[in-house]
Amino acid sequence: MQHLIIGAGPAGVVAAESIRKYDSSSTVTLISNEPDRPYSRLAIPHFLQGKIDENATYLRRGSDYFAAHSIDVRKGSVVKVDTLADAVNLEDGSRLEYDRLLIATGTRPEKPTIPGNDLPGVVNCWTLNDARKIVGHSGVNSKITIVGAGFIGCIILDALARAGVRLNLIEKGNHILPHLMNEASSRLIRSWCEAKGVTVRTSTDIKAIEKKAHTKKSDKSHSQQLSVLLNSGESLPADMVIFATGTTMNTAFLEGSDIAYKQGVLVDECLNTTTPKVYAAGDVCQGIDFTAGKRRVQAIQLTASEHGRIAAANMCGLKAKYPGSITMNVLDTLGFVSSSFGLWGGVDGGESSTDSDSSSYTYLNLQFKEDLLIGATSLGNAEHISLLPRLIHSRVPLKLWKKRLIENPSRLIEAYQALSQPDHCRI
C-alpha cells in the first residue's frame, strides 16, 4: 500500500506517524514544499521573541527522525492530482502514484496588491524563513508596522512587543480581531494594547509603501527605511512592514480533479473527500463543525492533529469518525488572555448575557440557544478556557442554570461544577 501525504504541517506529520503505527509495511511519503524540516507555525512567535532557537520550532527533534520511522520526506510542490490514475504531478515534472492520498496543504498568506508590497522589508509572517527576516529587523526600539489585526496579527504583535519593538497596528475594519471577538471585547483588548505602548489604528487602510532615502550617505543601516502611506494622508516610518491580512486555501492544484472544494476541501465524518481514495485534514479541510452542525474550516493546530490521526486510521482501513470541532480561539496579548468558543456571536432567536468591568479588564458574554450554552467570549479569566468548551461540547441541558446565568454570568464556574454532577437535573 502506498500512502501519499501532501503537506508537512501538524496534520500531515501526525497522519504519517499514525499510518506507520497502524501499518508497518506500507510506504509513507510526505511531500513538503518548504526547504526546512517540518516545523510548527505556533512556535514562530517564541522564535521571534528569542525564547527558542530554530531547532525548537521543528515538529520532531533530530534530522534523521522521519527516516528512522520509515517516512520518506520529499521536497516539492504538487501541481495536479490525477484522480483517474491515482497519481500526483510535481512541479519538477516527476509523478508519484498512490493507493491512498491525504491532502493537508493548509493555507498561504495574502498580500494586498498595493504599490511597494514587494519592497525589501515588506513580508508576511508565515514561514520559518519569514521569521528569520523579521528577527533581522526587530531589535529593541525598531519600528514595525503590522497590517491586519486578526488572530495572526495579534500573535505577531505580542511576540514583537515583548521583544521591545515599537509597533503600529493597522486594521481595515472598525475593530480589531473582527472574526474572534465582538466590538465590546475588542475594545478592551485594544485598550490593553495601547496601555502597553502599541499604537492601534482601526478603519484605516494602506495606500502604498515607499522606500525612504537615507539622509546621510554614511548611514548604511536599515533604520526606518520604509514609509507607510495611509488613506488618512498620514505617513508612518517603519523598519519593516508585516502583512497579516488573511489567508487563502492551498487548493489550486485540485482544479480539474474529482475532489470537491469550496472554502476548503469538503470531507465527511471520516475525513474522506468526494473521491473514495482521497482524504483531507487540517486547515485546508472543510469539515463538520460540532456546534453549528455544518461544514466549516477550523484553523486550529489541535484540530489539525486530530484530523491527521482520524484520516490515517481510515486510510489504513480502520473505522474512525470525527465528531466535529468547536470553534476555539485563545489569545495571550501581552499578558491579557482572551478567548471565544463555539457560536460566540449567537444565533437568531437565541439569548445572551454579559458581565463586564473595563476597569479590571474582565469580560464574559454567554450565548444560549433554547436550553443549551452554544458560545461564549471571556477576557481576563484564564480558568474559563478549560471549562467553557467542555460545557458547550457536553450539550448538557442547563435547566434552572440558564436563568441564573442570564441574571448573573459571573456564576459560570458555580454552574459548571453543578452541571458536572450526575444529579444536576435536580438542581
Image (cartoon, helix red, strand yellow):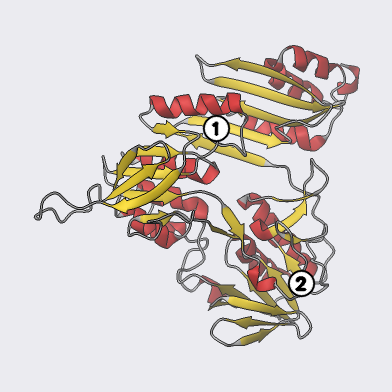
**Tag 2's secondary structure?**
strand
Residue 50 lies left or right of residue 297; in this view the side is: left
Residue 152, percent across and down? 51, 46
Q: Locate the N terminus by quadrant.
A: bottom right
In the image, is residue 156 above or below residue 258? above
Q: Residue at x 54, y 77 (%)?
A: 76
In the image, is residue 91 above or below residue 305? below
Quadrant in the picture for residue 261: bottom right
Residues at marks 2 and 1, CA–CA distance in whole angstroms:
41 Å
Quadrant in the picture for residue 130: bottom left
Q: Which residue is mark 2?
A: 278
CB under 8 Å between discs 2 and 1? no
Q: Locate the C terminus by quadrant.
A: top right
Closer to viewer: mark 2 or mark 1: 1
Residue 51, percent across and down? 37, 47
Q: Residue furthest right?
A: 426
Q: Which residue is mark 1?
A: 174
Q: Residue furthest left?
A: 218
Residue 410, percent across and down? 67, 16
**Kind of residue at badge 1:** Asn
In the image, is residue 247 above or below residue 95? above
